[in-house]
Image: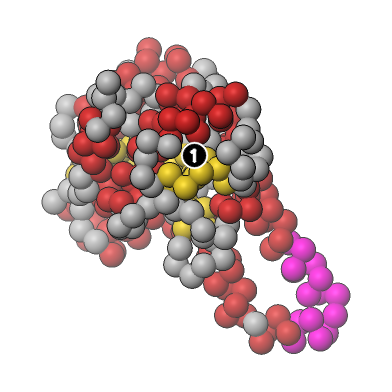
Amino acid sequence: MVKIAIDAMGGDFGAEPIISGVVEALKQREFQAYLVGDEINLKSLIPQEYLKFITFIQSDEIFGMDESATDVLKRKDSSIYKAIELVRNGECKAVVSAGHSGASMSLATLRLGRIKGISRPAIATLMPTTQTNKKTLVLDVGANVDCKAENLFEFAIMGYAYAKEIMKINNPKIGLLSNGEEDCKGNEITKETFEMLKKLDSFIGNVEGNQIFDGSVDVIICDGFVGNILLKTGEGVASAITKIIKQNVKKSPFAILGAMLMRGVFKKLKNQIDYDEYGGAPLLGVKDCVIISHGKSSPKAIKNAIFQALKFSESKINEVILDELTKFEK
C-alpha cells in the first residue's frame, strides 16, 4: 500500500479541511496516510473505520506563512520538516502540504535533493482549456523568479516527461511563452531559450498567452515570475467571471430562468476553472514526489492533491526526465 506523508497542520484553516480531504480520498482509494501534527487533535477528526489507514507522526510546531522560507531548516520539529523527512528516509513515497510553499520547496531541494542534471526544480500546474478533457501544463509558476536559458530548457524536459508519463500524452507539444509567435520575439533570455529548445522534436516554437487556454499546445514554458502572475491572473479572472454572471442573473427574471435552464453548463464551467479539481502543483526536478497545495485548500482540493501524489509516486516520471536529459549531455 502506498504511503503518503501529509502536513496536517500547514494550511490556513488548520487541520480540519486537510483531514476531511484525507478521509474523502480514503473513501475512494486505500493508501496509508502518515499525518504529521498534533495526534490528539487529528485523531478526533477521523472516523473510527479509517484509523487503520492512518499513522500519526507527532509535531507540535507549525511553520507560519509569514516566516522566511530559509528559516525552516532550523525548525526540525515543524510539521512540514517532519513530513519531508518521512520521504527522505524512505518511509513514504510522497508528501502533500498546504503550508508555506517556499518552505516546502527549500526542504524538498535541500533534504530530498535534485535529479541529476536539473539545476532548479520547477512548480508545474494544469490550466483549463476550451477543449473537453484537455489541460495545458504550465511551468514554472513560482519556484524561480529569475532564470537562465538553461533552466528553461530543463523545465521543458520536465514538462515533457510529466505530460507523457502522468497526462498520458504520447507526443506532447511544447511551447515557449513569449510576446509573439514569431521566432524573433521575446527578451534576451527567451530568444536564447528558443535556440536551445529547437533541439527538441516536441518544440513547436513561441506561443502567446491565449494559447494557454485554447488547447493547441500541451506544455508551456516560462520563468516563475511570469508563471506566477499568469496563475494568479487566471484564478482572478475565473473568480471574476463567476461573480459577474451571478450579479447579472439576479437583475432579470428572464436571466434567472435562463440560468436555471443552463445549470448543467454552469456546473461544467465551474468544474473546469475550479482549482479544487487539481488540488495541488507538483514540484518537478526533485528526487521524490512533492505536491504543493494552496493554503486555502478545501477538503476536495486536498483529496485531489493526494490523488496526484499517488499517481506521481506510481509513475516513472523521474526516470523519463533522466533519460531525456542524457540525450543532450555535452
User: Is residue 49 inside the magenta stretch?
Assistant: no
Q: Position of residue 231 (x, y in %)?
A: 58, 44
Q: Is residue 324 above or below residue 109?
A: below
Question: What's the residue at 83%, 84% (across, down)?
Answer: 253
Q: In the image shown, does 245 or 207 lie closer to the viewer?
A: 207
**Residue at horizontal 47%, vertical 31%?**
195
Front residue of this view, candidates 143 and 91 = 143
Residue 206 picture quarter = top right
At x 27%, y 47%, the residue is 312
**Where, quadrant-wise, is the C terminus in this rendering?**
top left
Residue nearest the viewer, comparing 301 with 203 = 203
**Mark 1 belongs to which amino acid?**
Ile
Q: Within 10 angstroms of label 1, few (less than 14), some, or many (20 or more) residues?
A: many
Q: Which residues are magenta?
A: 243-257
Q: Position of residue 241 (x, y in %)?
A: 71, 61
The stretch drawn in magenta includes residue 246: yes
Q: Quadrant of residue 111?
A: top left
SS at circle 1: strand
Q: Mostly what secondary structure, the magenta segment? A: helix
Q: Residue at x 20, y 58 (%)?
A: 30
Q: How many marks?
A: 1
Residue designated by label 1: 221
**Which residue ends up furthest to the right in the rendered image?**
251
Tell me, what colour scheme is on the image?
Answer: secondary structure
Residue 318 can be seen, yes or no: no
Q: Nearer the viewer, residue 271 or 234?
A: 234
In the rendered image, residue 229, in percent from the top left (x then y), is placed at 63, 38
Left or right of residue 13: residue 157: left
Q: Residue 301 location in percent, x, y?
A: 45, 53
Instruction: Indicate left or right for 182 with 194 as reference.
Output: right
Please tell me whether residue 96 is drawn above or below residue 101 in the rendered image. below
